[in-house]
Structures are given as structure tokens and as C-alpha cells.
Amino acid sequence: MFWLIRWCVILLMSVVLVSACATPTAAVDLTLNTGGCTPNSITLPPTHEPTLTIRNIAHEAMVVSIPVMDLWIEVAPRDSGVLELPRYIMGTFDLFCLSAADHRALGGDNPFLCVLEPDELRPVSRSSGKLIIEPHDRIREILEQER
């Protein structure tokens, strides 16, 4: 009987330790739904990597667009994606969330079109807001490489 209890304790401890070592799920910066983005505005602190982790909970493909950066990402329904931001950029930028169908109708997926302008996105976007990238010192990486 003692060996059975001991074996159960070892098994239980193994399960606890394995679950403690499981890869944590990435924090989501922005959630897309049929109404647009939640939250509408995002502030990235200096410690945040220059990426936006996006989850689409809508039943349709959605797009997040940052026109001034000439960046956009389409996220499939019930999927997640990561929008890589320029590493050294700081400041406040317009952010638009719209359906992928509306984005295509505007020509946003046309490789010969440089960028959609905020005035084109605003009327069809489900929501709009601001992306605020707080001041950081990532440029120090380049300066330290030069030494």
C-alpha cells in the first residue's frame, strides 16, 4: 500500500512540475471583434518589444492598419498574429481596424499602392484609435555595436 501512495505522490508532483514549465501564452495587446479593436488606443511602454500581438475573435478576417508606418496585418477569424513595428520608432500614430473585405475593396492589398491614407480608412473602419510608443533607448543597441 505504501508503494502505491508513494507512486501517486510522485505522479502528482510530476504533473505539477510539468505544468509549471509549460510555455506561457503570449499577452494580447489588441483584440479584434466585429466592432473593431479593443482597446481602441494602445500605449507601448519602453520595456515592450516593438510588436503588437493581435487576436481576432470575429467570425470574419480583420485588418489592423497603421498608415503612417505603411504597416497592416490581416488576421484570420479566430486566429492570432503579430505586427512587427519599426524597432526605433517612437511617438503617436493613427490605428485603424476594419474588415479584410473592406481593406481589399479599398485596394489595401495592392502591392503597387504605397499606402492607404487615414482619410480613406476612416469612413470604412470599424474603429480607430491611437498607437502610442513611449520614448525608449533602443537606439543604444546600435551605439553599443559600434564600440
Image (cartoon, rainbow, N blue to C red):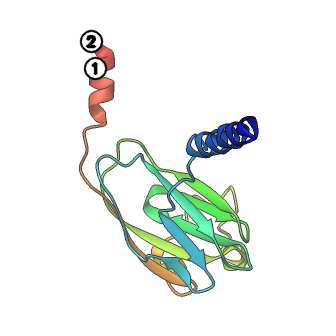
Percent from the top left, x then y, of residue 83? 55, 54
Pick the quarter of the image with the C terminus.
top left
Check residue 147 in the rendering and tell me which mark sits there, or answer none.
2
Left or right, 41 with respect to 72, comes to left
- The answer to whether the residues at label 1 and label 2 have Cβ atoms under 8 Å apart is yes
Q: Nearest the camera: 135 or 11? A: 11
Tell me the element at label 1: helix
Q: In the figure, 11 relative to 29: above or below?
A: above
Residue drawn at point x = 66 percent, y = 37 percent: 10
Q: Nearest the camera: 104 or 23? A: 23
Identify residue for label 1.
144
Left or right, 88 with respect to 98, comes to left
Label 1 neighbourhood size at 10 Å, few (<14), some (14-19), many (20+)? few
Query: Which amino acid type is shown beneath numbered disc 2?
Result: Arg
Identify the image quadrant of residue 125: bottom right
Residue drawn at point x = 25 percent, y = 38 percent: 137
Residue drawn at point x = 63 percent, y = 57 percent: 81
Label 2 neighbourhood size at 10 Å, few (<14), some (14-19), many (20+)? few
Q: CA distance from mark 1 to mark 2?
A: 5 Å
Q: Nearest the camera: 125 or 39? A: 39
Query: Which amino acid type is shown beneath numbered disc 1?
Result: Glu
In the rendered picture of this protein, how many numbered marks are placed on residues? 2
